[in-house]
């Protein structure tokens, strides 16, 4: 009897999980499907699901009109650069907060997070003016720094959570064996925290890849990433939904593939410490 | 990953980023523009310009609202990211007055600045100085299904009234066949539903402000205009019209689901092209007015090319503007893609070209543009310039809020009277805060 109830519950849970998963994924699926339609089919009512003449024409037009490789390269540089730079700053910061906390550590953590509560547009002008002064407008280096700073609170918080799970006794044992601070972080802490660091890295990479406010406002030609590439196909006066969908699919494909292959690490990282 | 590897990777990425940025180039101008058919077509001909002048062109194409925010930030901070900006009739006189744009008062004789349609030239000038050259211009007009009108036994006048439009909508409305009598914009946004309800208001004699900058939404003309619109759309419009903008209505019309559509003249080429299932059955008429009111519900707009003050490439930018808005460019497009695809509404000579006169919507577009007067948008005098907008910096934010209230009324979330009361409060508060009163 108990087994029957368990099986039924499992079936219900599985069905519900699939239903929610499909619901969340549906907009992406629809975008991908629309990218293979003609503009007329894209706006057909009732909507066409699979029964249309599949075409690659939109991808051809997008590739012809835009320098996709340049946008992609910029996205990789900005997301990758800001992630690595962020980790270099966040690992020592999270280490000190987790293992050498002071009376104000909790306050500092909250203060860091509070910077995420400010609407980005509120600091657009100061940052824009700063970028003009420093000659960083439309530069990848400038974007890497901004992306790093934007995501730093999240990286520190995530790493802090992981580091707190590591028994301090192990670090003390390493110290007793004569490990220096550098050796302690490099050879004891980091290997133990690798799953956490990996998932933090992945999440930060995805956040930086998808960020659309600063990347649109601080770039024009040279440093414009894939978010600018998508924006160039959005039009309030003219039906270009199929082309916009093709551009969107091309922009999200790399990150979708990365997410697919690293989903175990991502899930593990995001649920780490949730259940104790 | 070790710290050393991470450091190496970061250094490599940053160096790579810097190295690839610093590539030597000849004269290159950067143009910020919107994504629409005419602008995309122009990008396709850039190589011709480069071949003629040796000037390279980089395009930054953005969605309209993103573009506005982007170029506004850049021009107000003297960021110098763009050598040419695509801006509209709303921004041009304001930015020109602020000294943010390079005056275009020294264009060459061959360019023939007097050939630009007077309505466009006035709308893109401040104190008689031209600050932006129109790439294309538009007004708004009625697009209707000739086959449905014929079946209904009606004939569309060249200059219909709103009362006739309602009668025609009732006659063509056929829910069983999924045909709406009329499709109109209802979507929130000053350039979307906000623009449409403003010109509708004009055609009922309403105005945003009196000569002392007092908000006028509490006047009977506004109540009459908005109630007429809501009743018309509730009776004969599509479901969910409160969220329909230009694209949604274009889609409905192209699929044969609208008897009439009143919108931008630039839509005429879309509803008569190969994507439209009703291309053979589209007629055009002037935008309507209420009986006894002299002003019609047609707007005036232009997408124009302007040079931000402070650009390092003023000469090259002017060369590009002269090329892109010239008679020669129009002929270049016509030769390659046909006269129906040339950028409309900018030059008088275009409408004198016999080949273009044969395009079915050409004359009605010109008549609609000529019927628009930005200095006298409505019946009573106003202290502002602009037909579907009020050319003051505060308008975009204020009108977006007002149009949100109207859209809420269209969606049945509040009454028209409540929406008008809120609009009155928003407009009054904005004017007081900005020091107009």
Image: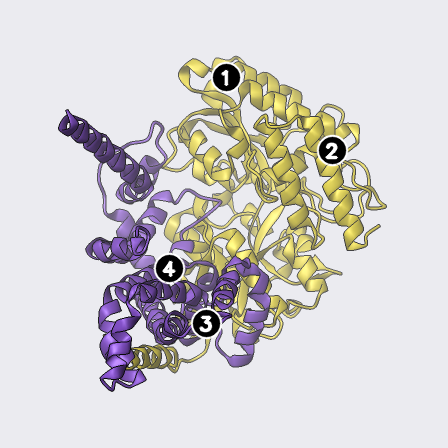
Chain colours: A purple, B yellow
Q: Quadrant of residue B97?
A: bottom right
Q: Secondary structure at mark 4?
A: helix
Chain of the residue under label 4: A
10 Å neighbourhood of mark 1: few (<14), some, or many (≥20)? many
* Of labels 4 and 3, the one closer to you: 4
Q: Which mark is residue A138?
A: 3
Q: Is residue A9 above or below residue A78?
A: above
At a point 66% along the width and 44% down the height, the residue shown is B399
The residue identified by callout 1 is B173
Chain of the residue under label 3: A
The residue identified by callout 2 is B421
The residue identified by callout 4 is A207
Q: Secondary structure at mark 2?
A: helix
Q: Quadrant of residue B189?
A: top right
Q: Position of residue B419 (x, y in %)?
A: 68, 32
B224 sits to left or right of B266: right
Q: Quadrant of residue A11?
A: top left
């Amino acid at each position: 009897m108990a087994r029957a109830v368990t099986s039924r519950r499992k079936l219900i849970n599985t069905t519900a999980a699939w239903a929610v998963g499909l619901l969340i994924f549906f907009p992406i699926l629809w975008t991908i499907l629309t990218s293979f339609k003609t503009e007329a089919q894209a706006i057909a009512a009732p909507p066409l699901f699979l029964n249309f003449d599949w075409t690659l024409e939109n991808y051809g037009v997008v590739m012809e009109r835009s320098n996709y490789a340049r946008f992609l390269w910029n996205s990789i540089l900005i997301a990758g650069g800001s992630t690595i730079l962020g980790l270099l700053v966040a690992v020592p910061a999270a280490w000190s907060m987790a293992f050498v906390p002071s009376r104000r550590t909790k306050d500092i953590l909250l203060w860091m997070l509070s910077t995420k509560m400010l609407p980005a547009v509120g600091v657009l002008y100061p940052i824009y003016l700063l970028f003009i002064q420093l000659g960083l407008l439309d530069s990848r280096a400038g974007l890497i720094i901004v992306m790093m700073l934007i995501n730093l609170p999240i990286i520190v918080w995530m790493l802090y959570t992981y580091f707190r799970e590591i028994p301090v006794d192990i670090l003390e044992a390493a110290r007793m064996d004569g490990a220096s601070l550098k050796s302690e972080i490099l050879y004891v802490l980091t290997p133990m925290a690798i799953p956490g660091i990996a998932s933090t890295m992945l999440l930060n990479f995805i956040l930086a890849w998808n960020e659309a406010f600063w990347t649109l406002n601080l770039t024009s030609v040279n440093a414009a990433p894939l978010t600018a590439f998508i924006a160039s196909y959005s039009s309030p006066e003219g039906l270009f939904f199929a082309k916009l969908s093709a551009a969107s699919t091309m922009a999200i494909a790399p990150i979708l593939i990365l997410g697919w292959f690293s989903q175990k690490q991502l899930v593990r990282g995001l649920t780490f410490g949730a259940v104790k | 990953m070790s710290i050393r590897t991470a450091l190496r990777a970061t250094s490599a990425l940053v160096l790579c980023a810097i190295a690839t940025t610093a590539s030597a180039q000849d004269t290159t101008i950067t143009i910020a523009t919107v994504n629409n058919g005419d602008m995309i077509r122009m990008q396709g001909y850039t190589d011709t310009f480069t071949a003629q002048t040796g000037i390279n062109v980089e395009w930054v194409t953005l969605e309209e609202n993103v573009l506005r925010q982007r170029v506004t930030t850049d021009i107000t901070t003297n960021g110098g990211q763009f050598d040419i900006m695509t801006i509209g009739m709303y921004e041009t006189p304001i930015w020109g007055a602020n000294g943010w744009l390079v005056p275009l008062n020294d264009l060459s004789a061959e360019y023939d600045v007097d050939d630009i349609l007077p309505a466009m030239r006035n709308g893109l000038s401040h104190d008689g100085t031209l600050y932006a050259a129109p790439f294309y211009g538009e007004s708004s007009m009625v697009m209707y299904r000739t086959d449905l009108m014929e079946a209904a036994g009606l004939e569309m006048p060249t200059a219909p009234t709103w009362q006739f439009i309602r009668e025609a909508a009732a006659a063509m409305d056929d829910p069983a066949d999924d045909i709406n009598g009329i499709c109109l914009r209802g979507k929130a946004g000053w350039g979307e539903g906000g623009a449409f309800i403003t010109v509708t208001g004009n055609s009922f004699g309403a105005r945003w402000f009196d000569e002392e900058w007092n908000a006028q939404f509490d006047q009977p003309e506004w109540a009459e205009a908005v109630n007429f619109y809501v009743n018309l759309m509730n009776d004969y419009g599509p479901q969910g019209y409160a969220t329909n903008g230009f694209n949604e209505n274009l889609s409905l019309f192209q699929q044969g689901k609208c008897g009439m559509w009143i919108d931008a003249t630039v839509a005429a080429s879309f509803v008569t092209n190969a994507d439209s299932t009703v291309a053979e059955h589209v007629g055009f008429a002037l935008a309507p007015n209420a009986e006894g009111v002299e002003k019609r519900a047609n707007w005036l707009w232009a997408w124009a090319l302007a040079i931000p003050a402070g650009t390092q490439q003023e000469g090259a930018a002017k060369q590009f503007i002269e090329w892109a808005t010239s008679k020669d460019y129009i002929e270049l497009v016509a030769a390659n893609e046909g006269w129906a695809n040339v950028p409309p509404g900018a030059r008088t000579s275009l409408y004198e070209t016999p080949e273009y006169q044969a395009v079915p919507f050409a004359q009605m577009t010109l008549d609609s543009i000529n019927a628009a007067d930005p200095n006298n948008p409505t019946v009573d005098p106003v202290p502002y310039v602009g037909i579907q907008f009020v050319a003051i910096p505060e308008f975009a934010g204020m009108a977006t809020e007002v149009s949100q209230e109207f859209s809420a009324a269209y969606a049945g979330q509040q009454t028209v009277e409540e929406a008008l009361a809120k609009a009155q409060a928003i407009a009054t508060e904005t004017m007081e805060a900005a020091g107009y009163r």
